[in-house]
Amino acid sequence: MADHTPTETSDIRAEAKGTAPVPLSVLDLVTVGAGHTATESLRTAVELSRLAEARGFHRYWVAEHHSMPGVASSSPAVILAHLAAHTTRIRLGSGGVMLPNHAPLVIAEQFGTLEAMAPGRIDLGLGRAPGTDGATAAALRRSDRLNEGADDFPQQLAELTRFLDDDFPDGHPYARIHAVPGPVQATSPGGVQSPHRPPVWLLGSSGFSARLAGTLGLPFAFAHHFSAQNTVPALDLYRESFRPSGVLDEPYALIGVSALATDDEKEARRQVEAAALNMVRLRTGRPGLVPTPEEAAAYDFSPMEREFVDSWNANVVHGTADEVRSGLDDLQKRTGADELMLTANAHSGAVRLRSYELIADAYGLPV
């Protein structure tokens, strides 16, 4: 099998910029607002990735979702290829690819291709949830045995890792199968192959992936933005379970955080109310485009819906730039996260872009 250089710690760890307590990164759901198109949202993604690169954000991830009109990130690898063509330094990755939806070989090929396009800049974040409802997951997987896919996640992960490293043992049924682009090209006559391969991250919103990431010595990303009550227990479990590996000597955990900064506090409340209405509709089986703040202001929330909105917005760090900075600082201290990955959910791309600019300014990130 091909010799290769394993993932370097420097591919994972980063240094904080400005006055930020830890490195700051971006999670983009490529949201589509009412009155806008997916084309506009993807153009915003390009603008945002370039802004993030210029202002010193460390990485830019996109997340796999399906059958959601307000989320245009059903194909992370396609979007990442597009962003790679418009950036030069920022790390790009999946936050994440939902591995049970795919054959491991396909993901190894896709991310090997991305690595060839943007050497040393690609992250492969993996989740075990479907990223959608059960019926859509069944359509993706051509099977209604969804629990089986989640239960098989450790085996799928091991298979994917072997494809990435091209190191199936002799006698294995896949020993003569190679993910291309990949390390096997270095062993072909005249072959020269990059020694790097995308570092694998495990994503989670509960304890399963936290424990698995710790046991395998992999970096861990926790979805605080939609599972805030589980953040501290999951990070504690990750750290307690951690075993040093060829990838990391010590645990490294980032958390995804909903954060929206605007020029005044009232506007922030208007924007997060619209994003919360979108979540109400999603959670009640009515996914749609992200509504406008005006639509949200006119919406008659039921008592149960209002309770959900208030609970949801309590975990969205929002307000003026100074208020968001203070909220992020407090959250980092409370969780001990090694990196904060910010996602700005709002109706318009302009509001989202402005939010990241304001946060960058508040922390004195490079201009």
Image (cartoon, rainbow, N blue to C red):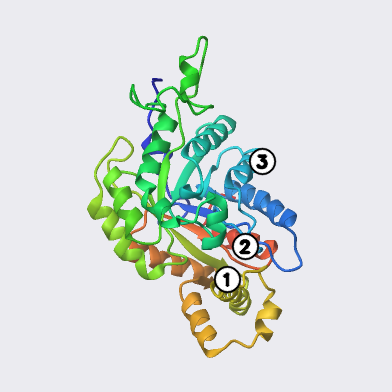
Mark found first going from the N terminus, 2 or 1: 2
Q: Which mark is residue 86?
A: 3
Amino acid, disc 1: Leu
Spatial separation of the CA atoms under disc 2 and disc 1: 8 Å
Spatial separation of the CA atoms under disc 3 and disc 2: 26 Å
Q: Secondary structure at mark 3?
A: loop
Give the labeled residue for mark 1: 282
Whether tag 2 and tag 1 are in contact, CB under 8 A, the answer is yes
Amino acid, disc 2: Met
Residue 22 seen in the current view = no
Q: Which mark is residue 319?
A: none
Spatial separation of the CA atoms under disc 1 and disc 3: 32 Å
Q: Position of residue 101 (x, y in %)?
A: 51, 49
Quick check: 361 above or below 265? above
Horizontal relation, residue 52 to residue 155: left or right: right
Give the labeled residue for mark 2: 68
